[in-house]
Amino acid sequence: MDPTTLQSTGETLKWLLTIAWLLPLFGFVVEIFGGWWGGRHSKSAAYLAVACIVTGFICSFSALITWGCSNHWAALQGHGDSHATESHDANSTEPSHQVDAHGEHAKDEHAKTDKHGHGETAHSESSDAEGHDTAAHPAAEIPRSQLIYTGLFYRLARFGSLDISLSYYIDSLTLVMFTMVTFIASCIHLFAIGYMADELTDNYEDHQVHTSHGHLHRPGRFYRFFAFLSLFSFSMLGLVLAGNIFQVFIFWELVGVCSYFLIGFYTERQSASNAANKAFIMNRVGDFGFLIGLMIIWTWFGTFQFGDVAVGKGGSVQPGLFSMARGSDGQLRLHIPESGVTEVVFKNKDNHIETDGNGEQRTIPYYLLIAAGLGVFGGCIGKSAQFPLQTWLPDAMEGPTPVSALVHSATMVAAGVYLVGRFYPMFTPEVLLAIAYTGCITLFLAATIAVVATDIKKVLAYSTISQLGYMMLGLGLGGWAAGLFHLITHAFFKSLMFLASGSVIHGCHHVQEMPQMGGLRRKMPFTAYTMLIGVIAISGLAVPYWTLWGEPIAFSGYHSKDAVVATALTFSKLNGHPLVFFIPLCGAGITAFYMFRLWFYTFAGKPRDHHVYDHAHESPWIIVLPLCVLSIFAMFCAFGGENGILYKLLLASEPIALANGSVPTADQVTAGLMNISLSSHEQIHANHAQAGLLALVVAFSGAFAAYVCYGARWINTSEIKVQFAGLPRFLVNMWGFDELYDIMFVRPSHVVAGWCSAFDRKVFDGFLHGCANAALKVSAWDRQFDETIVDGAVNAVGNWTNSLGRSLSVVQTGRMRNYVMFIAVGLLGVFAALIAFFPST
Amino acid sequence: MTGHQLLFSIFALTTCGGALAVVLSQNVVRMAFWLIISLGASAGLFFLLNADFVGTAQLLVYVGGTLVLLVFGVMLTASGPFSDFKTRPGETFMAGIVALSLLLMMVFTVCSVDWKKVVAATNQGVPISTAQSVATGFNDSEEGNTARPLGMALLGIRVDHGIDSGANANRIGYLLPFEIASMHLLVVLIGAAYLARAKRRVQEI
Amino acid sequence: MDLNCSLFVGAVLFVAGVVCMATKRNGIGVLMGVELVLNAANLNFVAFANYTRLGLDGQVFSLFVIVLAAAEAAVALAIALSFYNNHLTIDVDKANQLQG
């Protein structure tokens, strides 16, 4: 491909994604500043928000197509080929399958839009072109420059060699994330029009806020909700598009703020406001680590850019972080001095050693690279609610359900996973292991709590945490594409389930407790069966032995979870660490158990609370429609599994040299670093069938157990609760994390604050009061002095002068005769004075 | 006691007594009478002091003119035959005290000066002959004729300092000031006539 | 007889005039006091003219004073009449508008 085409493709992608990115911002500005215009009953804000995000989706999808066409879908084809050589499938069937998959995919996504035709023509063109253009080239030789587009939007500031800029980094991961985020956000915006309709009033009665005059009444905030949703969409897209880690941080904080606004949307509720605070503060804890990572990177690398960016007009290319750390061969180059710490040598874009002005090689100590990685991952822990900062996410369910669906399941919490994926080349094996174990602990922890939760949204929240743990686990174990694959599929089915639960809550008039539900499938069939699709998807159920077009009959969750479990199995086979395989395997079973428990509890059986049941109703079409659309995607978005289009697209952006796995190099062994091998695609594929089978068995047993306990009720669960008295309570208390944090942080800080306050009150206040009192006393004295002495003197002089004048005025009799007398007396006086003072004369 | 001294004593006593009588009498007409006595006697004193022209003018102008004017004033302003304006005794007493002190003060002052010495000092540098004549007083008292020297003095020629003395060379006489003063006085008199003219008085209620 | 005697007489006249001015409530009486004071001055002038080198200057001055006194008397009388016209009395104590 010639450079001109490359450049124009880059420009096209850039502008398409920029439009998609900035439109929600435009929407936000208009909605927040002009929202009052239409009045409290107007839905115009919602229509504007939907228009913005749908246009954003069209742009994003166009960008995805453009990207694909520009490299003639080499990502799908090429990797398919390379993969095919390792797979059991026949080479000849693979390409045709790809065409089918893509066609079907495009049809599903865009039956209603003209993109369908465009997509197919583009594809056929590309396959035609492929025939005589790239057919000669092996796929592995496709230059990465054709897959990744980086550049600069605007330079904000420049400190020495460090640029603070707005830049972009577009690869298939960015594009897939853009498409996913805009699509789900569109669905959720639509859903929210129906769900938030009760805010379209001048007098909203909040039944959960009790004031002295009964329930709280306030004006509806419909337009504000959509303004925040738009702002969130803008921030999330900016985060995905960001081309440098600092820009990521900016939008990271922006999504955090949006999350804060949206969790605290019912700000009058104490619980909502507390939850918003909790989410924000917990995220700050993680962001502290993020900041430390940023500082290390700033100090040692001197750049924040992910990719290589052309600087200035001269075309000199400044290497980005990934190039500096990994080079083009994807390996860390270690420098082990005789004494001192092991260092990582920076490389330039040509995979040579990067030198500074003095010709000396630029390095970073290995432990600092670990610290930077752990710091950035700390931010991801906070954002993705991983252990030990997981407690904010369940509380965040205080926000409206569309918020939970968009922000707290599909997108924002996935941003942590996305960043781990994006920042992957910077993580050393040690950090990756930490990520894996964090995910491992989190997924088990959250899954066990979800088993006993009774609030329908809380179950989903713990499920989200658990699934995020899966993603982290997959990423940490070297399954880069597997983790992100699960991220995308999870986004679809989890948002579907959240929306379905929103529909239930809407239909049951804001009842969220599952024990009050039951049998609702007869009242709201659409909700029930779309929810069932989501439940099957997340549980990873499939039809064993039978295949359709060579593919297992299964929903999206099966494929992605299988990929993660297969990675885990391979990793534990290579390196030991059996826990990282067994825990996710158990987790798969627990997941199936609690998800089916939720479904049976809510939709099956007999109504438990007839009041709720009698008033329940199916939601309006605007709520049901997004459910149906999302359920289609929850079923088919991962169609094809590891050979499917989605996985292939993601794989195109996989960090270099991950495909072939890695073993500890001689340098690493010499330096005494951790002895970790990462598995190659080939190894993973070899274990795929085994892992998939195990996971399927476990998932089925979990689902069966749920059916036994809650569907068919062969076993009375309350008896189990009685027998294991402590365990459910322990789980209901969320493993005591809230109490633990309460004891560890909240109470000590209360005590310290108490000390500080007492110190303040006793010492500072005492001192200040003393000073004030002293000043008061002094000024009282001063006043006394002023009033008596100074004023007294002045007044006395005045009075004296006055009285003197008055007494002297008596002399002014006005009688001539008296004046003559005075003259005479005066004359006498003058003579007397003369005689007295000049006696000699 | 020479005749001169006798006459001086008589005139002096009469002058002083008249003046005291003016002070002490309560009736205006009597006061005017006693004033005539006092002023007349003082004219005698002028004669004795070799100032015959001044004494004459005194008699003519004062006794003949001014006092008549005063008597006219008395008559014009008399509000009734029994109108008298009693002074308060306290005021009278105070006035007496002040008068006595004033008198004592002046007598003391006059006595404390050695007049001979003063006269001698003022005569220094003056030709002896003239000084002699001055020391004995300007003479020709027998002649009692000062009208002509006065007229000459008005013109600037001082007979008493010696006609030929150099002191006369640049002397300016009193004539011009006299004329200026007389013109002013004329204006004043016209003003007085204007003031004193009979006005149509608004009848008081 | 010497200068002192004349000066004593002048002093008595002066004091009498002053007392007259100070005690008489009749406006004409006050005028008479003024005449006495002026006369005392005349007497002193003449006495100094006679006994010192002042000579004719003193007499000329006394002439001035006489003329001046005559004019003054006329003016004063006019004032007195005007006062009388306004107050219907000649009591100078009634003229106390200058009282402070």
Image (cartoon, coloured by chain):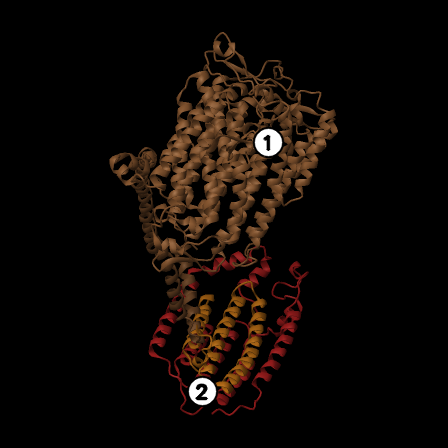
Chain colours: A brown, B red, C orange
Question: Callout 1: few (<14), some (14-19), or many (20+) C-alpha neighbours within 10 Å?
Answer: many
Tell me which amino acid carries mark 1: Ile
Badges 2 and 1, same chain: no
Q: Which residue is mark 2?
A: B29
Percent x, y for residue C69? 54, 76
State which mark lies toward you, 2 or 1.
1
What is the CA distance from the residue labelled 2 to the residue labelled 1? Answer: 151 Å
Residue ranking furthest to the front: A546
Q: Residue at x 64, y 59 (%)?
A: B167
To which quarter of the image does residue B97 belong?
bottom left
Residue B75 percent location from the top left of the image:
49, 89
Give the residue at mark 1: A645
- Compare residues B2 and A776 and report the one nearer the observer: A776
Which quadrant holds residue A643?
top right
Residue A204 vs residue A363: left or right?
left
Rendering coords of residue A382 (x, y %): 44, 33
Can residue B114 be seen by looking at this rendering? yes
Q: Is residue A124 left or right of residue B67?
A: right
Where disc 1 sits, the SS reads: helix
